[in-house]
Amino acid sequence: QVQLVESGGGTVQAGGSQTLSCAASGRTFSNYAMGWFRQAPGKEREFIAAIARISTRTVYADSVRGRFTISRDNAKNTVYLQMNSLKPEDTAVYFCAAVERVNLFTYETSKTNYDYWGQGTQVTISA
């Protein structure tokens, strides 16, 4: 079992920046590919960003590419989501997710491929 705990949510003005953290515990963090998703009211949970076991392998949704950056610190068992140039439409509950992978270079963009989820953290962007 892997336990994931997100933090860093809150209310930010449009155009501002915010960094989310997701702390993992329970297993060897470096064995897991990680992802960030978000869910706005009345909408499905959508993919935002993912990172493979090796930090240089990342992928982003079109809606956040160039504004958001995913990173990981295996020594701290933590994955981050740096969010810049925030827009009101970025308002959502943000979730991190983990899946164990043998391949160092694999990332996952589908929520159905993830085995473990955090409880989510609310991010609200005010206009």
Image (tube, rainbow, N blue to C red):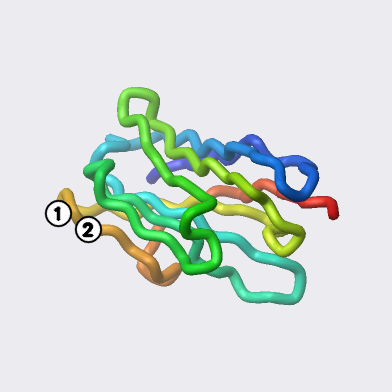
Of all residues shown, which one is farthest toward the left?
103
The label number, if any, that marks residue 106 in the structure image: 2
Residue 108 vs residue 65: left or right? Answer: left
Residue at 14% over, 54% down: 103
Name which residue type carries label 1.
Asn
The label number, if any, that marks residue 103 in the structure image: 1
Q: Is residue 117 visible?
A: no
C-alpha gap between disc 2 and disc 1: 6 Å
Residue at 80% over, 45% down: 13
Density class for disc 2 (Cα within 10 Å; few <14, some 14-19, many ≥20) is some
Quadrant assignment, res 76: top left
Quadrant assignment, res 30: top left
The label number, if any, that marks residue 118 in the structure image: none
Q: Is residue 51 shown above or below 18? A: below
Q: Secondary structure at mark 2?
A: loop
* Nearest to the observer: residue 59 or residue 32: 59
* Quadrant showing the N terminus: top left
* Nearest to the observer: residue 46 or residue 25: 46
Name which residue type carries label 2.
Thr
Residue at 65% over, 35% down: 8
Q: Secondary structure at mark 1?
A: loop
